[in-house]
């Protein structure tokens, strides 16, 4: 406690220098905290979304990887089709537990649709394992042919009537928020009704008709048996002409690579701040030790041990940088607001849902930021502290005169 009290008194001697150093540390720790929170949030969104996806493999037409990735992540309407007979062939494979087809369609501008350019997905309730399990709210009855299910971000209310291509549907239920654009933004209907809409679209002349029929699907979601050889199943599916296999890992890896590119500048700048703070603290505490040679020499002369002086300098650095770390967390909270209005807003504008980390996770990141600031202080002050501890009392007193 005496060492702590003496360290506090020494820091109070030069309030401007102390405040300047604390602010410098705060900038670095705040950048680390805010960047980690945003990247953790994106990771959480991806992990939560794909954990709820339920499918191990996604079979799509050749050449549609980018479109399918966009549909999954953002919910942006994507339309592509392949021969629907592939569903039965895939179901027949020994390692496949479930296979459920989906067909993608989009609405058109005009009086026959409640809204233009909305993403509609036809799914098969009998084989489905990725939509119905995540119903958060629904009507107290079984789903009817003219019912639709909306994503967690949809503005439609349960029981509301909507119409697409002149046909009326009732909003039967709403999915939980998943963090995946497809399941948060799309409208889901029975696959047979999607085929009916393709026929109905031909009656209207103010928009191109939907370009698919009952023999086609857009994607096939595949769940593999726990004991099956995943590589063998993928190889068997890949033998079908015109089919392309996507795994959740492919999409997550791609997005994470894009995120690394997005945040690389911030990470580099943060690393520069940290390295700069270490060097700055080392230089300034060297100056402080040099200014206080007489004082340190007198402490040694009256019986202070070498380790006491070493601990005194480190205590001052630890107090200073810990205070800077706490201040940095507060600064980082303000930076998070900036991120919310820039990066997160940009993601939301592309219909990519963003899930903020939980309060406990944010608290952990704040603690890491403070500990990092403390380590910066201890690292930067280590050499000046050693210099102070090895000085001979007589030489230090004479040098400080």
Image: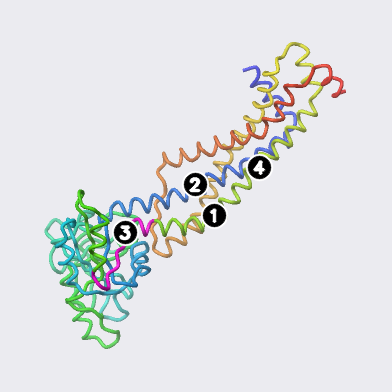
Check disc 1: other Cα within 10 Å, few if <14, some if 14-19, many if 20+.
Answer: few
* Spatial separation of the CA atoms under disc 4 and disc 3: 45 Å
Pointers 2 and 4 in contact (C-beta within 8 Å): no
Q: Residue at x 43, y 64 (%)?
A: 349
Q: Earlier in the sequence, mark 4 or mark 1?
A: 4
Helix, strand or loop at label 4? It is helix
Q: Earlier in the sequence, mark 2 or mark 1?
A: 2
Q: Which residue is mark 1?
A: 264
Pointers 4 and 1 in contact (C-beta within 8 Å): no
Please state which of the two labelled residues, at mark 2 or mark 1, is closer to the viewer.
Answer: 1
Side (left or right) of 90 relative to 61: left
Side (left or right) of 7 relative to 357: right
* Spatial separation of the CA atoms under disc 3 and disc 2: 27 Å
Give the image location of residue 322, x and y in percent. Answer: 59, 33
* Spatial separation of the CA atoms under disc 1 and disc 3: 26 Å
Q: Which residues are magenta?
A: 240-252
State how the image is colored: rainbow
Label annotation for residue 162: none
Q: Which residue is mark 2?
A: 36
Q: Which residue is mark 4?
A: 24
Label annotation for residue 247: 3
Give the image location of residue 150, x and y in percent. Answer: 26, 62
Give the image quarter of residue 74.
bottom left
Is residue 233 positioned above or below 285 on the image? below
Helix, strand or loop at label 2? It is helix
Helix, strand or loop at label 3? It is strand
* Spatial separation of the CA atoms under disc 4 and disc 1: 21 Å
Pointers 1 and 3 in contact (C-beta within 8 Å): no
Check disc 4: other Cα within 10 Å, few if <14, some if 14-19, many if 20+.
Answer: many
């Amino acid at each position: 406690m005496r060492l702590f009290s003496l360290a506090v008194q020494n820091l109070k001697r030069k309030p401007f220098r102390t405040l300047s150093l604390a602010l410098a540390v705060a900038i670095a720790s705040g950048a680390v905290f805010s960047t980690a929170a945003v990247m953790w949030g994106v990771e959480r969104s991806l992990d939560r979304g794909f954990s709820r996806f339920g499918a191990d493999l996604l079979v799509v037409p050749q050449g549609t990887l980018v479109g399918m990735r966009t549909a999954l992540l953002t919910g942006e309407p994507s339309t592509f089709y392949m021969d629907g007979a592939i569903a039965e062939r895939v179901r027949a494979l020994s390692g496949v537990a479930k296979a459920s087809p989906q067909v993608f369609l989009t609405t058109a501008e005009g009086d026959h649709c409640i809204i233009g350019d909305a993403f509609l997905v036809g799914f098969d309730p009998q084989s489905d394992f990725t939509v119905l399990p995540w119903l958060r709210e629904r009507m107290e009855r079984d789903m009817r042919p003219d019912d639709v299910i909306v994503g967690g971000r949809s503005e439609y209310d349960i029981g509301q009537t909507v119409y697409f291509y002149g046909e009326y549907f009732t909003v039967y239920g709403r999915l939980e928020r998943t963090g995946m654009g497809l399941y948060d933004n799309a409208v889901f209907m029975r696959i047979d009704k999607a085929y009916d809409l393709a026929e109905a679209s031909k009656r209207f002349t103010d928009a191109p008709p939907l370009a698919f029929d009952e023999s086609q699907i857009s994607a096939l979601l595949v769940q593999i048996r726990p004991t099956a050889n995943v590589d063998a199943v993928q190889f068997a599916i890949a033998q079908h002409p015109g089919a392309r296999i996507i795994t959740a890992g492919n999409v997550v890896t791609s997005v994470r690579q894009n995120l690394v590119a997005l945040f690389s500048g911030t990470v580099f700048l943060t690393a520069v701040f940290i390295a700069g703070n270490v060097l700055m603290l080392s230089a300034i505490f060297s100056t402080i030790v040099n200014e206080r040679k007489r004082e340190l020499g007198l402490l040694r002369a009256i019986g202070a041990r070498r380790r006491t002086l070493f601990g005194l300098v480190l205590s001052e650095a630890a107090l200073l940088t810990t205070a800077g770390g706490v201040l940095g967390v507060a600064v980082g909270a303000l930076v998070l607001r900036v991120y919310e209005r820039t990066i997160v807003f940009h993601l939301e504008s592309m219909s990519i849902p963003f899930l903020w980390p939980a309060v406990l996770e944010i608290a952990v990141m704040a603690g890491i930021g403070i500990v990092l600031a403390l380590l910066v202080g201890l690292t930067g002050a280590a050499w000046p502290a050693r210099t102070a501890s090895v000085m001979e009392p007589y030489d230090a007193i004479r040098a400080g005169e």
